[in-house]
Image (cartoon, rainbow, N blue to C red):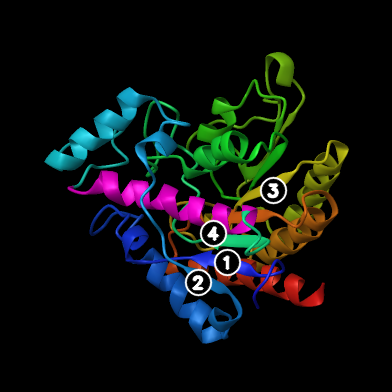
Amino acid sequence: MRGTSATVVVSGEAIGRYGFGEGHPFGTDRQDAFLAVLRSSGLESQVLMRAPRLATRAELESFHTPAFVDFVASRSASGTGYLDRGDTPAFVGVYEAASAVVGAALVALEAIMGGEAQRGFVPIAGLHHAGRGHAAGFCVFNDCGVVIEQLRQRYGVRRIAYIDIDAHHGDGVFYAFEADPDLRFADLHEDGRFLYPGTGAVEETGRGPALGTKLNIPLAPGSDDEVFRHAWSRVEDYLQDKPPEFLLLQCGADSVGGDPITHLRFTEEAHALAAARLAVLADRYCLGRVLALGGGGYSRENIGRAWTRVVKSFVDHGSAV
């Protein structure tokens, strides 16, 4: 479907190269696992498929410090060492691969803000652990943070809501905007007492002028779809309290049961529900504008099912309006 009710999906070899080698949970086969299920579902013909591009240095530096961008470029040239304390190894070309992830998110954003589509999805994206000046947890450049900054700088959109259903807390986004009252932040994640990065306690609600504007919902290991639905109702109430102008969803599939490194027990129905409900809220408050970013997920089967359900929810919503 074309026109403003369309869904855009950005994929391609450039972001498929973002991964950390044989044996690492974040391998380079993750995009293919999603695309195989998307194609078998028949949805590929119902979306606008777009290729990624490299983010410019200026776009990267709208969120990241110049010193950190330089550091990644240097390690990318040598292909040695780590980009953080041991989770995220450097490889030759990591700068370009990570820049493509950011560029892919911006391609989707440009399609939405340019009126080509209302909803978007990028599978290899949602790298929510990277901070303004550091990599962390398999995340080199934080495409979520760049999208937020670009919405403000290029499009004049101030009130943005970031929603995260990845098993891990989106600490790179949270702390970057912890004192920003215009960035609404709602994160359902496995309790940090049991899972990396150990942050996202319920008491973390923002600071300074943003105190009370952030919602962290830590969940016990083993939490299932019933727990998710109850927590999700809190997210919707929170979003409607001060409606945003744009919705950004990080929909990591590592919250689905059976992931090898996490302990939540959602099914893909949680991802379908989140995407469907955000599409409704986007129509109500945001001119239909919602962008979903894949995030984590280390069971290839879960990736395919959960992310395809996100796309299906978006496509079905567009067909119904």
Amino acid type assigned to the residue bearing label 1 in the image: Val
| Residue plotted at (75% across, 43% down) | 245
Q: From what the image shows, is residue 49 above or below residue 289?
A: below
The residue at which mark 1 appears reads as 8
> Residue 10's x, y, as percent?
48, 64
Residue 95 in the figure: left or right of residue 162: left
Which image quadrant for residue 161? top right
Q: What range of the chain is rendered magenta?
A: 92-113
Q: Are marks 2 and 1 in contact (CB under 8 Å)?
A: yes
The residue at which mark 2 appears reads as 49
Q: Name the disc covering residue 247, or none.
A: 3
Residue 286 in the figure: left or right of residue 251: right
Secondary element type, mark 4: helix
Q: Name the disc covering residue 260, or none.
A: none
CA gap between label 3 and label 4 equals 19 Å
Label 3 Cα neighbours within 10 Å, binned few <14 / some 14-19 / many ≥20: many
Q: Main secondary structure of the magenta part?
A: helix
Q: Is residue 194 visible?
A: no
Secondary element type, mark 1: strand
Amino acid type assigned to the residue bearing label 3 in the image: Leu
Tell me the mark number nearer the camera, choosing from 3 and 1: 1
Which image quadrant for residue 225? bottom right
Residue found at the far top of this picture: 208
Tell me the mark number nearer the camera, choosing from 2 and 3: 2
CA gap between label 3 and label 1 equals 15 Å
Q: From what the image shows, is residue 56 above or below residue 312?
A: above
- Give whichever of 294, 99 is nearer the camera: 99
